[in-house]
Amino acid sequence: MTPVRRRSWLEVRWRQFRNAPRPVVRAVLSSLIVAVVLAGLYLAYDVALDRGVRLPGGDLRAAAVVVYVAVVLVVGSGGTLLGVPVPSGSGPPGRRTGWSAALGFFAAVPIAYLVLVATVQIVRPLLG
């Protein structure tokens, strides 16, 4: 019998990335899609204000960030609650519980932050 080859740390992480559980992928993607769309809208608003476009209400960038974070968290939690059943193993089919919403919330928090930081710190300076 030949001994089992030990995999490197990178090989193990790459395999975990390629074979991520579907509930986790759905939770991350639902939050990521909403975050990217809303960050694009925020970026358009920010560019318009910097170029002198007069919008009703004046400069509401701080409020826009608060709304962005709230919507990403709510949609991430709610979307995961509605679309991702809790894994049930070999038991009855999965059902949706508060744990599904918690999974979505905890996936949405870093995604909201990272997408907004990438938009403001990387993409925005490229647009001038």
Image (cartoon, rainbow, N blue to C red):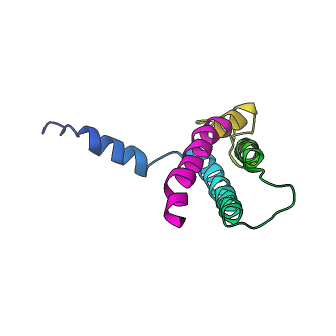
From the top left corner, tell me how far across and down residue 64 is, in percent: 75, 49
Observer-nearest residue: 68 or 34? 68
Q: Residue at x 58, y 45 (%)?
A: 111
Quadrant hosting residue 104: top right
**Residue extent of the magenta highlight:** 105-128
Quadrant hosting residue 93: top right
* Furthest residue toward front: 52
From the top left corner, tell me how far across and down residue 80 is, in percent: 70, 45
User: In terms of secondary structure, what is the magenta stretch mainly?
Assistant: helix
* Furthest residue toward left: 2
* Furthest residue toward right: 56
Asked if residue 22 shows in the view, the reply is no
Q: Is residue 25 above or below residue 124?
A: above
Asked if residue 66 shows in the view, the reply is yes
Inspect the magenta stretch and tell me whether residue 102 lies in it.
no
Observer-nearest residue: 28 or 60? 60
Quadrant hosting residue 108: top right
Q: Residue at x 51, y 51 (%)?
A: 121
**Quadrant in which the N terminus is drawn:** top left
From the top left corner, tell me how far across and down residue 96 is, in percent: 75, 39
Observer-nearest residue: 22 or 41? 41
From the top left corner, tell me how far across and down residue 59 is, in percent: 77, 53
Inspect the magenta stretch and tell me whether residue 112 lies in it.
yes
- From the viewer's perspective, tell me whether residue 16 is left or right of residue 65: left
Q: Residue at x 86, y 55 (%)?
A: 57
- From the viewer's perspective, tell me whether residue 116 is left or right of residue 53: left
